Image: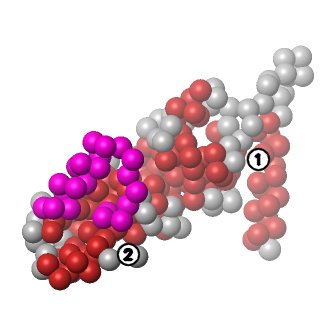
Amino acid sequence: MNQVIRCFAFAAITYLSVTNTDAAEPIQAVPLYSQAELLELIEKNEHLTRVKLDDCQLVQDIKARAEIMELPSYQFLYGDMLAYAVCVERDVELGLFYMRKSAEQGLAPALEQLGRYYDVGQLVQADKAMAITYLREAASLGNINAQVRLVDIFNQGHGSPRDYEDAYRWLFHSIVSDKKLHKRIELSLSKLAEKMPDSVVTRARMPM
C-alpha cells in the first residue's frame, strides 16, 4: 500500500514540475539526468554546477527522487544542494541527513564526502574515528579519494594497525593515470609500510 501511495505521489510531483501554468509562454523542459549521467557528474564533482546551469528547473524532480523514490544518487545531490544553498534554501542539517541516507545505501561518493567532512571538520565537528568509519567503507568500494585519505590518516597516527593491511592493499592495487597522484600514492604507501611487518606488506601486495 505504501509503495502505491509513493508511486502516485511521485507521478503527481513529476507532472507538476514539468507543467507550465502559462500556456502563452512555454518553458523548454530540461531532461532529467539518468543514473549513469548523475553518477558521472558526482564523480567529477560537477553535479551542483550542472543543476545551476540548468536554471534550477529540476529541483522538484530531484527532491522527489530523493524523498519518495529514495535513490541514493539523488539523495546525495539533494543533500549537497541543501548544504550549499544551490537552487534551494540552505538547510545544512537536512542536507547532511540526505547525505547520510545516501551513504547508508552504499554510495561511495557520499561515504567519501562524509569521511572527508569528519576528517577536516567541515559542516560537522572533526572526528577521526567517524572519518575512518566512512572512508574505510568508501575505500573498500574502490573510491580512490577515500583510499588516499584513509592511508594519510593512518600515517598521521590515527586508527588501528589492524586496518593498515586493507588500506595498503586497496591503494596499492588502485589504477591511477595521473603521474602526480601516482607519486603521492607511492610516498604514502612507503610511509605506511614502515608501520607494518614486511610479511604483511608482502601479503597486501599479492594480486587480489
Could you say where residue 207 lies in the image, as x and y percent from the top left?
A: 38, 75
Q: Residue at x 46, y 41 (%)?
A: 45
Which residue sits furthest right? Answer: 23
Amino acid on which disc 1 is placed: Ile
Q: Give the range drawn in magenta.
A: 171-191
Tell which of 133 and 188 is nearer to you.
188
Lateral position of residue 186 relative to residue 49, left or right: left
Question: Toward which corner of the image does residue 33 lie, by quadrant?
Answer: top right
Q: Where is residue 35 in the image (x, y as percent from the top left)?
A: 66, 52
Q: Is mark 1 on a helix, strand or loop?
A: helix
Q: In which quarter of the image is residue 66?
A: bottom right
Q: In which quarter of the view is residue 21 placed?
A: top right
Q: The N terminus is located in which quarter?
A: bottom right
The prevailing secondary structure element of the residues shown in magenta is helix
At numbered mark 2, what does the secondary structure look like: helix, strand or loop? Answer: loop
Residue under label 1: 13
In the displayed structure, 130 sits above or below 161; it is above
Q: Quadrant of the C terminus?
A: bottom left
Label 2 crowd (10 A; few <14 / some 14-19 / many >=20): few
Compare residues 147 and 72 and report the one nearer the observer.
147
Q: Nearer the viewer, mark 1 or mark 2?
A: 2
Instruction: Assess whether residue 179 is covered by the magenta stretch.
Output: yes
Residue at left 63%, top 59%? Answer: 71
Given the image, on which type of amino acid does mark 2 rest?
Pro
- How many marks are shown on the rendered structure? 2
Residue 77 position, x and y percent, is 54, 47
Confirm whether residue 83 shows in the render.
yes
Query: Would you say residue 124 is visible in this rendering?
Result: no
- Tell me if residue 112 is in the magenta stretch: no
Q: Residue at x 76, y 54 (%)?
A: 10
The reply, left or right, for residue 115 in relation to residue 199 is right
Q: Identify the residue position indicated by label 2 in the image.
A: 207
